[in-house]
Image (cartoon, helix red, strand yellow):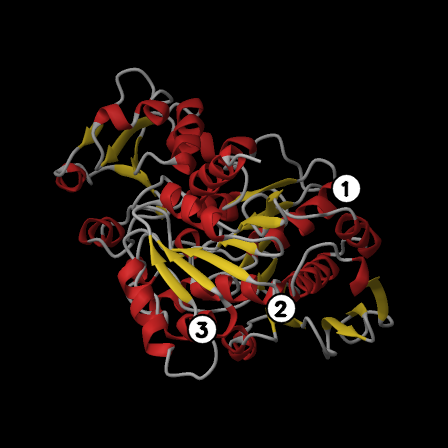
Amino acid sequence: MAGLPERFRGRRVAVLGLQRSNAAVVRYLARQGARVEAYDLRPPESLVPYAADLPAGAPLFTGPAYLERLEDRLHDLAGLFVSPGIRKDLPVLRRAAASGVPLWTEAAFVLQHAPCPVIGITGSAGKTTTTTLVGEAVRRWRPASLVGGNIGVPLIDRLDGLGPEARIVLELSSFQLELCQVSPSVAALLNLRPNHLDVHGSMEAYTDAKRRAYRFQRPGEWTVFGLDDAGAAALMAEAPAGALGFRGSGPVAAGAGVVDGWVWWVPPAGGGPDHPVLAVASIRLPGAHNVQNVAAAIAVAGAAGVPLDLVAEVVGGFAGIEHRLELVRERRGVRWVNDSIATAPDRVAAALESFAGRPLTLLAGGYDKGLPFDDLGRLVVERVGRLILFGAAADRLERAVAAARLYPGPQPEVERAPDLAAAVALAAEGAVAGDVVLLSPACASYDQFRDFEERGRRFKALVAELPE
């Protein structure tokens, strides 16, 4: 981090969007003596938790004209930090870049200025579980290491205390990657499926954002690709440095694969002998997708030089993460499961696979990100006995299921609820012993909740309130 305080001290730095990551940016900039100014669409009363970190007297521009105010003040900016969820193709951001203003997300800045090697994990699904497994193994190996990015806490205001012996493990979303000009020394692209098309505008733009996880790598660095996923596997040949793969079943040429009930580490040529790391039966996380996540964690850790016995130790004691196939309660023989993280159809598909053969009531709906629901509609017809829809995307989801009813066999019962509370009440009325009630929405939460975590917590509270 040498030289950075001088870069910002006494100079104007803008923060666009006062979200969680940019609140940490504000704290960092204030410590460096920057002249911070903030811009946000929301009214001041909505920004109180974040604006409290602004230095006294710092300008805060809000309301519908906030981008115009930024446009008027682009001159002499030493940098511009953009909240991850804001579109990066806004005309004002294009003009800022054209005029030489450095643009960052918080994660992009951390990548560019980290004083130690960075491990970065991205993908359309599985990022959090894989990052958590790798991060815990890394912290047991190098205790001073940090885990952050799209998971946990922003790291920009924690970089100063790190030395070269530490490691940073980042979960990286497409939004965080868009402004990256540096790639992690070890990266992973777990999978690549349609997501966030409402913001990126096209699958091509979404894919280009994900490419930045490895695009700027140098010789001697590594990217791990998910070979069970056609989208990720197709990009493996693009890797500018070393490339490894992982599979949830079957061998790999180099990386991690599953053979004869064991997850094996297969080093790249000259890296030593292949060896089994842990038995699939020891993985406590449900579902085939979690076997893939474990294989990914082993491949990433192996590429980063992390002792693999630490990964096996972490996996053996790991039962899951909140809001990801989280068992909330068993009531009257009915299992209630919180999978609020499932904001895209492929995540729901993985959840349904985890409960194959069990009678299922699926609670789905929310903010419509413009993702295709056709495949999900067919899967619901095949796997779900009862579908309860809520939120803004309910109409489109119902049409997808109706279109899939051409398939023979039992048809799901489809019901509508105005909100999550009503959906839980409906599910409780009809559930019988042996059923699974699964909140796996296939949609974002922004129509009724701040984020998927708030939605998941609300679901858990509603389920806890159901009488015995």
Amino acid tagged 1: Arg
Q: Give whichever of discs 2 and 3 has the lower sequence position.
A: 2
Q: Is residue 208 left or right of residue 154?
A: left
Q: Position of residue 101 (x, y in %)?
A: 29, 46
Amino acid tagged 3: Val
| Quadrant of image for the C terminus | top right
Spatial CA distance of label 1 from label 2 is 38 Å
Amino acid tagged 2: Gly
Q: Which residue is mark 2?
A: 357
Q: Nearer the viewer, residue 342 or 54?
A: 342
Q: Which residue is mark 3?
A: 381
Classify mark 1: residues with Cα within 10 Å, few (<14), some (14-19) or many (20+): some
Residue 197 placement: quadrant = bottom left
Spatial CA distance of label 3 from label 1 is 45 Å
Q: Which residue is mark 1?
A: 140
Classify mark 3: residues with Cα within 10 Å, few (<14), some (14-19) or many (20+): many
